[in-house]
Image (cartoon, helix red, strand yellow):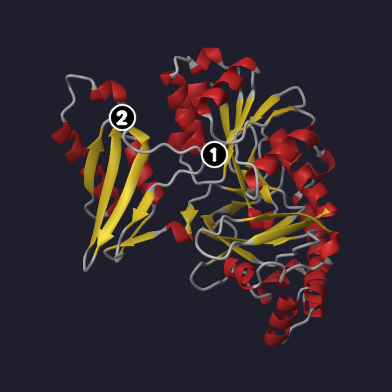
Amino acid sequence: MFEPEIERMKTDQIKKLQEERFIRQVRHAYENVPMYKKRFRDKGITPDDIRTLDDAYKIPLTVKDDLRDHYPYGILAVPLRDVVEMHASSGTTGIPTVVTYTERDMRTWRRLMARTYAAAGVTSEDIVQNAYGYGLFTGGLGFHYGIQELGAMGVPTATGNTKRQLRMMKDMKTTVLAATPSYALFLGEAAKAEGYDPLNDFNLRIGMFGAEPWSEEARKKIQDTFGLRAHDVYGMSELYGPGVAVECEHQNGLHIWADEFLVEVIDPDTGEVLEEGKKGELVFTMLTREAMPLLRYRTKDLAVIEWEECECGRYHPRIMRIKGRADDMLIVGGVNVFPSQIEHVLMNIEELAGEFFQIVLEGDILDRLYVKAEVEPKFFKSDKYDAAKLKKKVEDELQAVLTLRARVELLAPGSLPRTEGKAKHVVDLRHKT
């Protein structure tokens, strides 16, 4: 453990600390962020009405559009001179979301990231290859800061230049890979194409994967390819970045660092707070952040939270794996479809390279769902390959899960574009001219 005095806290101790910090943070946001003061007044409440954690539901929810509407500094709670770093989203869907940090915020983020690495089993003796993108995206620098805080050796390769990435992995004797899961899958494929034997030519033992949803089937493929233990890492730029939660060595849920984050689960349609064990949308309140004290921030991530003790001895609540994102859900002909459902089907058909697929949506009056999937190389070259038979098998299995018919197109290995960052699995062409 990186901070055993915090990581070993019992549930009642955690909640006592949360309550103290929560009450203080509510007042900080109310007194220093005009948006929150107005919302409190509109609802007829003040910080004096927030006395316990049970009062959290009284506070209005915050959403991503609030950050865009108050771009760039409208949610800043400290003087601009106290800000030492900022990050931002790509802004591909419009105005970017900007997040800011004081020096104390940066120290907190570095500690959380070091704690995240340590919980997954990384030590100061490890060599960590950081293949996340550096820059305004929080991933690269977040993982970088954690390496330094932990005292491990960092290899800041960033995303891309895959041949050099593999060469450095071999020559530097990298033991920990930090990357998006889709890039890890791509590295495995590229390594074999370059003549490497990933199990014997590399020294990887731990993988730190996040920034996008991934399935248990993808985890298994990464672990089998590289012989490492793959850990899910959860975070988002609005909540510092990576380092909000991580799987320990038991890989049974992601521990949320509850000394810094208060988590609630709400009904995504009504906003009602759900009891423990119910699946719903995760809502986070940052408990000590100075620069941007977000209260009850809606993540759109759907999951179940458990507070039971883990085998590792931690009592910090666990996200029992992200079930999908509310805004990732596709409505096709009136049917709700999650890309993760399609991935799950494809990854369980041995004739397919299930991690390489694309969902294409077309439609004018009627929606049409197409799924493009690559065939596994060894099967594609086999005399047993029957495209028509395999196509029907895939369509039938997808229909059994989705309750609607998808048109499947089987592709030769390597046909779909590869990504060195987050994978883009969905192309929605409906109603576009």
Q: Quadrant of the C terminus?
A: bottom left
Query: Residue tagged by mark 2?
Result: 413
Vertical order, 262 against 383 (above or below): below
Q: Find the residue positioned furthest to the top.
A: 200
Which class describes the residues within 10 Å of circle 1: few (<14), some (14-19), or many (20+)?
many
Please name the amino acid that badge 2 sits on: Pro
Residue 237: percent from the left, percent from the top? 64, 54
Vertical order, 160 against 241 (above or below): above
User: Of marks 1 and 2, which one's residue comes earlier in the chain?
Assistant: 1
Vertical order, 395 against 95 (above or below): above
Q: Is residue 255 visible?
A: no
Name the residue nearer the viewer: 88 or 43: 88
Please name the amino acid that badge 1 sits on: Thr
Vertical order, 416 against 66 (above or below): above
- How many labels were placed on the picture? 2
Q: Quadrant of the N terminus?
A: top right
Mark pair 1, 2: CA separation: 21 Å
**Residue visible at 51% across and 24% down?**
163
Q: Secondary structure at mark 2?
A: loop
Query: Residue tagged by mark 1?
Result: 180
Residue 338: percent from the left, percent from the top? 39, 53
**Residue visible at 48% across and 51% down?**
323
Residue 262: percent from the left, percent from the top? 70, 59
Number of the label disc, if any, that sits on residue 20 = none
Q: Secondary structure at mark 1?
A: loop
Quarter of the image for residue 128 reads: top right
